[in-house]
Image (spheres, coloured by chain):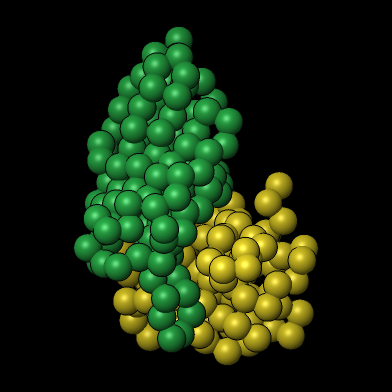
Amino acid sequence: ETGVTQSPTHLIKTRGQQVTLRCSSQSGHNTVSWYQQALGQGPQFIFQYYREEENGRGNFPPRFSGLQFPNYSSELNVNALELDDSALYLCAIPRGTPSSGANVLTFGAGSRLTVL
Amino acid sequence: QQPVQSPQAVILREGEDAVINCSSSKALYSVHWYRQKHGEAPVFLMILLKGGEQKGHEKISASFNEKKQQSSLYLTASQLSYSGTYFCGTEILTGGGNKLTFGTGTQLKVEL
């Protein structure tokens, strides 16, 4: 149990559909990051939210969008799904930042999306 | 740019040692190491900040060569529980949200 909860755990969509993935944490941290992990690859940074505002984005198109709510839960939305969007989507919160400010992450178990 | 990990995969007998390397082309602020078991979330192992320090946790330790932008993870006297995929995550300081850039991973299998 990591303290980071993601839902749904698995889902299947077809090309062109839209999907919403959710993330919440027991600690209610004000920073949340989303990563995409394709099969056999390392996680790739999608974006980060800090106090409900996007605070950094990776190399992903605008059809990947997010929200962070006042209770610090978060959503990842993907529009116009493509086959290559099939992946494990991971939500991560800072674990407990050392005084140096390094970004140690606690990941949720992820949502596995299959696009047919 | 994604850090390069080597080897891609390694098989060990229980009790053997292994070294996993991570190399970046960018000036790094920190290097993180995570282990991911099949179907599970990546789990944090340790972080190394610039300064060439070496850290350890039981029989797993790591080093960070700031000049070469390289890090190595050392697993000694491997146990079955060490099996999984190891990722290094590199961090540079940016103006908008510190992010980790992960390597492609090293699959480690420990057998009896």
Q: Quadrant of the N terminus of chain B?
A: bottom left
User: Is residue A67 shown to the viewer in this render?
Assistant: yes
User: Is residue B32 shown to the viewer in this render?
Assistant: no
Q: Return the residue found at the far bottom.
A: A53
Q: Quadrant of residue B102?
A: bottom left
Q: Quadrant of residue A80?
A: bottom left
x 54%, y 66%: residue:
A103
Q: Return the residue found at the far left.
A: B25
Image chain in yellow? A
Where residue B7 appears, as percent x and y from the top left, is 25, 36
Residue B55 position (above or below residue A60): above
Q: Quadrant of the C terminus of chain B?
A: top left
User: Could you tell me how many numbered marks the image carries?
Assistant: 0
Residue B26 position (above or below residue B18): below
x 31%, y 28%: residue:
B10
Where residue A34 appears, as percent x and y from the top left, is 50, 69
User: Which colour denotes chain B?
Assistant: green
Q: Nearer the viewer, residue B84 or B44?
A: B44
x 36%, y 27%: residue:
B18
Q: Nearer the viewer, residue A31 or A68?
A: A31
Residue A66 shown left or right of residue B73 in the figure: right
Residue A95 shown left or right of residue A10 in the figure: right
Residue A61 shown left or right of residue B78 in the figure: left
Residue B17 position (above or below residue B70): above
Residue B64 position (above or below residue A18): above
Where residue A25 appears, as percent x and y from the top left, is 72, 65
Residue B42 shown left or right of residue B1 in the figure: right
x 45%, y 34%: residue:
B84
Where residue A116 appears, as percent x and y from the top left, is 36, 59
